[in-house]
Image: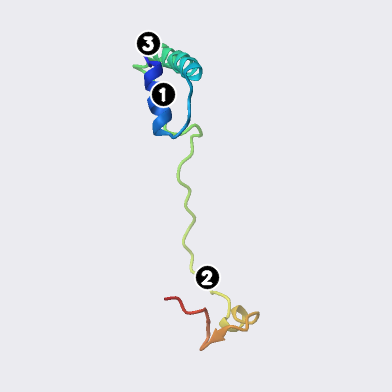
């Protein structure tokens, strides 16, 4: 059971200003959420397999096929910033 003092403490930790009326309301709402979790705890899930992903997919890999790349002159054709067959970038310290 969550108390209004705990709600105020969490508000303080989150740097959220919560007044006394709001802390009572939040405590009630959070306790109702915890009640729902209590209902879920009562459900028998002994023979239910765990669900790791909602869509039953497997990793899909493509074949790693070596292909020729673009010619270096075509790659550098649209830049003015090139040096010795490479892109020239600004110096970074």
**CA separation in Å, label 1 and label 2:** 62 Å
**CA separation in Å, label 2 and label 3:** 58 Å
Q: Is residue 37 above or below residue 79?
A: above
Q: Residue at x 37, y 21 (%)?
A: 6
For the residue carrying disc 1, how many other residues have a C-alpha within 10 Å: few (<14), some (14-19), or many (20+)? many
- Of the 4 image quadrants, the one containing the C terminus is bottom left
Check whether the beta carbons of the residues at disc 2 and disc 3 lie within 8 A of each other: no
Q: Is residue 31 above or below residue 51?
A: above
Check whether the beta carbons of the residues at disc 1 and disc 2 lie within 8 A of each other: no
Local SS, label 3: helix
Q: Which residue is mark 3?
A: 42
* Left or right position of 9 against 16: left
Query: Which residue is outermost to the bottom?
Result: 84
Local SS, label 2: loop
Residue toward you, 54 or 41: 41
- Give the percent coordinates (x, y) of residue 79: 63, 80
- Give the percent coordinates (x, y) of residue 59: 45, 46
Q: Nearer the viewer, mark 2 or mark 3?
A: 3
């Amino acid at each position: 059971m969550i108390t209004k003092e705990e709600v105020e403490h969490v508000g303080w930790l989150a740097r959220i200003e919560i007044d006394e009326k709001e802390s009572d309301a939040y405590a009630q709402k959070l306790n109702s959420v915890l009640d729902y979790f209590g209902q879920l705890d009562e459900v028998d899930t002994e023979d239910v397999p765990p669900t790791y992903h909602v869509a039953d997919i497997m990793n899909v890999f493509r074949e790693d096929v070596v292909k020729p790349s673009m010619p270096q002159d075509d790659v550098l054709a649209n830049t003015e910033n090139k040096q010795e067959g490479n892109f020239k970038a600004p110096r970074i310290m």
